[in-house]
Each structure stands twice: as C-alpha cells, then as structure tokens.
Amino acid sequence: MDPVTLACAVVPLTALLYALHGLRRRRGRADAERRAAALATDPYRAAAGRRWAEDDTQAAAARLLLDGLATVNHRGNLSLTRSGADPARTAGHPLPDALLAALRRRTVPATLGRIELGDTAFRAARQDFHAAWRADLPRSRPDSGCFTAAGALLLIGETAFTVTALLDTAPRGPFQWVAAAATGLALLLQLTWLNRYGRKDPPVAGNASSPAERPALHPALVELASRDPRSRDRLGAGRRRTRGRRSHSRGTRSSPGT
C-alpha cells in the first residue's frame, strides 16, 4: 500500500486517540475534585479514611473534650461532665452526638476503644453517617469494559495491518519516505497510548493514598493537641484499650438485694 495513504489514515487516528485520552484524564480529575470538594464540606467525612488515631471517631471524642462535655482520665477512660450529662446539650454533629449518647448510656467511665467495639448503637450511628455522606458523593463515570476491550483489539489489528503494509512496499522518493517515517512514529505512539490507557491517573488532593496527599487533620484533633496534649495522649491510649472493667447500661442496672 502507498505509504502516503497509510500516513493519511494512521496519523489522524493517532491524534484522535491522544485527544480522547486527554478528555478521559480531564473527566477523571474533574470527578475526583468534585468528590474531594464534597468531603471538604464536613471534616468528619475527610477523617473517615484516616488511620485510627486520626479518624472520625477520634475526632468526635476530641470534640467532646474541647466542648467540655466529657473528660478523659489517666487510664484513657471517658466520662461525662455535668454539662455533658444534661440531655439538652448536644455536640452539634451526628457523630460526636452519637458518642455523647453512648457515654450517657453507661454508668461507669469507659475507654473509646471499648465504646467503639462494644456499643452497637454507636457503631450503627457511625455506619449510618458514613452511608449517608457516601450516597451524596458525585459518582465517577466508569469506562465501559466491553468498548475498551473492543477498541484495544481493533487498534492491535490496525497496527498489525499497517506494519504489514509498510513492509510489503518499499517507499519510493523522499515524499514516501517521510510518509513512512510518520506512519512508523504514529504506530509507536499508538502502542504507547495502549500501554498507558489502563493505568490510573495520579490522585488529586482529597482522594489520595500517600500521607503527604491526604486531607488535613481534623480541626478538633489539631486543637486538642495544641490546647491539651496530655488529654490527646490519654485519648489515644484509651482507643487502644478495648478490654477493661465491665460497664452496664442505665437500663440494666441491678437493684439492691437482687
């Protein structure tokens, strides 16, 4: 086949493939940025995926300490203050409110780790909170696997055909040699495109896995570390303690003589 004819077909196809790849990357970044913006509206959402010492449960406990609704002792046990025991007081957010309600159900202090492990109502409230905000996140538009596989097969077939055609007819004259070189370069770029197409794009802020790219630490944890680092350390120690003195709910307290 005439190298000029091949170049007129292969070079525009290569340009189209890279244009589609650029649009795909741009769409993926836009979706990720929308999800990151949705997470940024509530610091507890952004904290949900962090390690246990910086997650939303830890932030909720820090918020109760900062608001004077709870205290933590040297053993890491959380207990209500007089203000926290007042049913009219709230923390102003579903997650710390759920933790506050868990403390009100207990008759003795308990560690944050024990509450998280043993209080089914708190776990259910936390799961409901997570489910609610995840349902509100903008959905990514996944690529169709069938179309992707079909496109890859077509591209491989086109590459094989073009290579065979180039080797079948030797170029004649400088114009055909330039066209053949352009076709060969276009094929190389197509193979590069095919190799990169299945890879994920680099993460954006708010949707990253490396520590340097994660969202900022929850404000309550930052403030507690600044104002009362001792309580911050006690809270962390209590999160690790999941066993201890058995606590009873207010509804199951035993009466004297029974």
Image: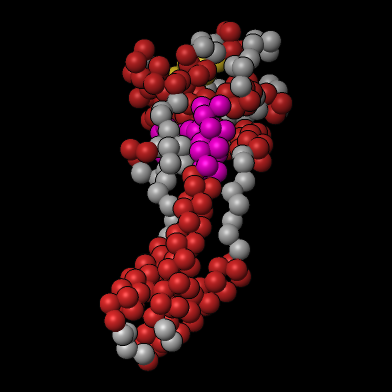
Image x and y of residue 3, in percent: 39, 80
In the image, is residue 4 above or below residue 54? Answer: below
* The stretch drawn in magenta includes residue 14: no
- Main secondary structure type of the part rendered in magenta: helix
Q: Which residues are magenta?
A: 30-55
In this orientation, which residue lies closer to the viewer: 176 or 13? 176
In this orientation, which residue lies closer to the viewer: 117 or 252? 117
Q: Is residue 117 visible?
A: no
Q: Is residue 158 visible?
A: yes
- Horizontal placement of 2 versus 44: left or right? left
Quarter holding residue 81:
top right
Furthest residue in direction bottom, as rendered: 168
Residue at (48% x, 79% y) in the render: 158
* The stretch drawn in magenta includes residue 31: yes
- For the C terminus, give its image quadrant: top right
- For the N terminus, give its image quadrant: bottom left
Residue at (48% x, 26% y) in the render: 59
Quarter holding residue 193:
bottom left
- Horizontal placement of 109 versus 187: left or right? right
Image x and y of residue 85, in percent: 62, 12
